[in-house]
Amino acid sequence: MSLYGIVIGLIVVTLLAVSLSRVRQVRTKADYLVAGRTLPAAVLVFTLLSSWIGSGSLLGGAENAYRHGFAALWQGGGGWAGLALIFFIAPRARKFAKFTIPDLLEARYNQTARVLGVIAVLFTYTAITSYQLIGGGDILHLIFPDRVSAVMGRYIIAGFVIVFTAIAGMGSVAYMDVVIGSLATVTILLSLPILIHLTGGWHAVHAALPATHFMVLGDITPVQAAELFLPTCLLMLGNQSMYQKFFSAKSERDARNAVVGWVIGTVVLETAIVALALVGSAMFPTGEVSQHPREILAYLAMNGLRGNAMLEFLGALMMGAIFAKIISTANNYLFSPATNLVNDVFVRYLRPTAGDRDVLLVSRLMVVLLGVWALWQSLGTESVLKKSLYAYTIYSAALTPVILAAFFWKRATAAGAVTSIALGTVVTVGWDSAWVHRVFPAVIAERDAILPALLVSLMALAIVSLMTPKPTEEQLQPFQS
């Protein structure tokens, strides 16, 4: 077995050991869904970082950077802007201390908002999980090209993710993220200067690429930059996985402190990922990877870090870190919608008196079923970047406006929220339909859905809320600072 295969095997065994070590501590619904609300700031930083930086950054963002250079940071920059605002939201989220975003939607609005929220989360998060499986499958194919096809790799990764997630819930996910986040941070930051040196220095990278690769907009338009920035920013602000981590914090202070570390880690790592892809574009402008640029980071680990045993060992660790990050993100985004089905459907409507044992059993079953659905979606997806922007847009248009309004706009009403969620989802899902191309000119119909979907969602929230009676003080009280 190659060094890369050995490292991947060790990572899988380590992650399984971490999951199994948490099993005995899972006895109640709160233990499984929000880690018993015991996570300190240090653990929160790594689990937030690992849940955010997955295939969307390591594959989709890297592909964008390989083709367009530093302009790809518009996608990451949306997340950074969202993080700056989250600093003020985190303590309020921990104070609210529920289990899911639909919990929040019902408390602030009504049951219909809760149900629509579940639907939006299911579509968004299984889509995000699906392209993590694609990324993991690609890596297994690169390491074992004669034994594992890219499609077979997706099945194998789906099995890993389902098992790891089902075992111990949030406690398992969070503590695995500490291991994964540490490994990824060290290997990516070590690899970048070494690869720049192997390319001949930064001046050689600059000389090998078009000047637009080093410009703020590069060869993309301001509208395209907004289409990268807005979905990421709005997903960050309303991200259920993030709120669920805040609900898991030991205290409001831990939640706020975790955001500071998360901001620093995200800015550093996403910039390093884009820079690595840029260096990869200079080192390997043609050949196999130029046809599949989403694989550039893994390709660099296998083919860029060569020359001696130490470099190859670092390459193997970097490959392992990328693989582990993808697994971690898939865990997070698979666990979150499973929580919705259990907490917001099973317990809320089907078995309100269900005991902890029944809840844990159904939770694990939901992880399996949703994992299979995500795998099915992955088999019909080719572009990770396109799939990620689609998933971000559903959430950004349907849920983020009403989530933020819950905390910051007292006048938002249940009718306004329901209309906003429904129209944001419908416009996003239906934007690629033939009807849109018949009704709108090509200059509008061929754009991504984020701008029209967000505009419709915000208008619906504002207009309908102002036309309907104000919410009661009882509804508003849990959301005030």
Image (tube, rainbow, N blue to C red):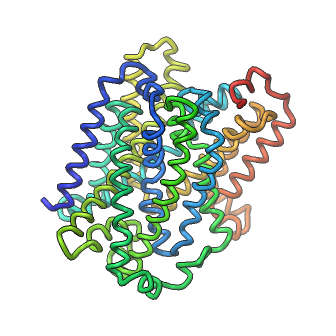
Position of the C terminus, as image quadrant, is top right
* Residue 331 seen in render: yes
Q: Residue at x 47, y 31 (%)?
A: 339
Position of the N terminus, as image quadrant, is bottom left
The x and y percentages for residue 126 are: 46, 44
Callout count: 0
The x and y percentages for residue 88 are: 66, 42
| Residue 475 position by quadrant | top right
Pick whichever, 254 or 3, lies toward us: 254
335, above or below 390, in the image: above
- List the single residue furthest toward the bottom: 207
Q: Residue at x 48, y 60 (%)?
A: 268
Q: Going by the image, does 391 lie left or right of 401? A: left
Q: Residue at x 59, y 60 (%)?
A: 77
The x and y percentages for residue 469 are: 85, 28
| Residue 134 position by quadrant | bottom left
Q: Residue at x 36, y 66 (%)?
A: 297
80, above or below 15, in the image: below
- List the single residue furthest toward the left: 1
| Residue 2 position by quadrant | bottom left
Q: Going by the image, does 291 lie left or right of 219? A: left
The x and y percentages for residue 35 are: 43, 28
* Residue 429 seen in render: no
